[in-house]
Amino acid sequence: MGAVELVGVAASLSFLAGWRLYACITAAGLAMRYGLLDLPQKIQALDALANPWVIGIAALGAIAELLADKVMWLDSLWDGAHTLIRPIGGALLALAVVDAQDPAWQVAAFLLGGGAALLSHSAKAGARAAVNTSPEPVSNIAVSGFEDVATAGGLWLVLSQPHIAIAVAVILALGAVGVIFLSWRILKRMRRWWSEL
């Protein structure tokens, strides 16, 4: 993989970690374990992602997240608890993918990965707050299902086709900004509606 592909994979995994951290860790660990993703030589401490125990624990976390994400208000509590965890996880995933030759690039990858995960996590949490204002549970399940499919598809696309990973990262970034803006408008409108009652 070339430098652009590595940066694209790192950015995409970080963005997707803001939605489904445990699924991303599981997928990255499996990809590293089975040679689909090369481990960086300079950062051997992160080969722990390919450890069967880490993969197993991350898979259990992915199942718990999958279930918690379908229940109205429990999803927002889960997101609140993961506001710090997802950006750190996204930053570590970026470090695991980018083979940095110097410490400055390692810090840049860590910060950009954490920022990408925080951006997508903020979009997810904002969208969930807006969706939770509706009284029926169907919209919550539909949004969660979309996130599941988008994450699984994004992971498959990025890990199997790393040459388009940078385009996936750009699309995810633009989508996250759009969702944050839309969620903010919906929540603002709902607040105004509640104040008029």
Image (cartoon, rainbow, N blue to C red):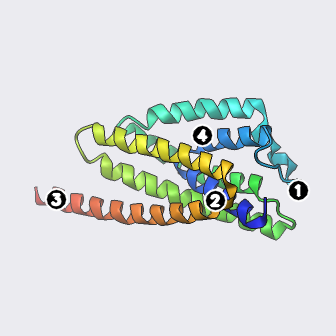
Residue nearest the viewer, comparing 161 with 186: 161
Does label 1 or label 3 sit earlier along the sequence?
1
Q: Nearer the viewer, mark 3 or mark 4?
A: 4
Answer with mark 1 or mark 4, whichever residue precedes in sequence: 4
The residue that label 3 is drawn on is: 193
Residue appearing at x 66%, y 53% in the figure: 161
Count of residue discs: 4
Q: Residues within 10 Å of mark 3 (few under 14, many from 20)?
A: few
Q: Amino acid at mark 2?
A: Ala
Question: What residue is shown at x 87% (from left), y 48% (from top)?
Answer: 44
| Residue holding disc 2 | 165
Residue type highlighted by circle 4: Ala
User: Where does the image place residue 43, in percent across and percent down from the top left?
Assistant: 85, 53
User: Crowding near pointer 2: few (<14 within 10 Å), some, many (20+)?
Assistant: many
From the image, tell me which residue sits under label 4: 23
Q: Which residue is mark 1?
A: 42
On screen, residue 99 versus residue 139, left or right, reads right
- CA–CA distance between discs 2 and 4? 18 Å
Q: Nearer the viewer, mark 2 or mark 1?
A: 2
- Pick out the residue farthest to the left: 197
Label 2 or label 4, whichever comes before in sequence order: 4
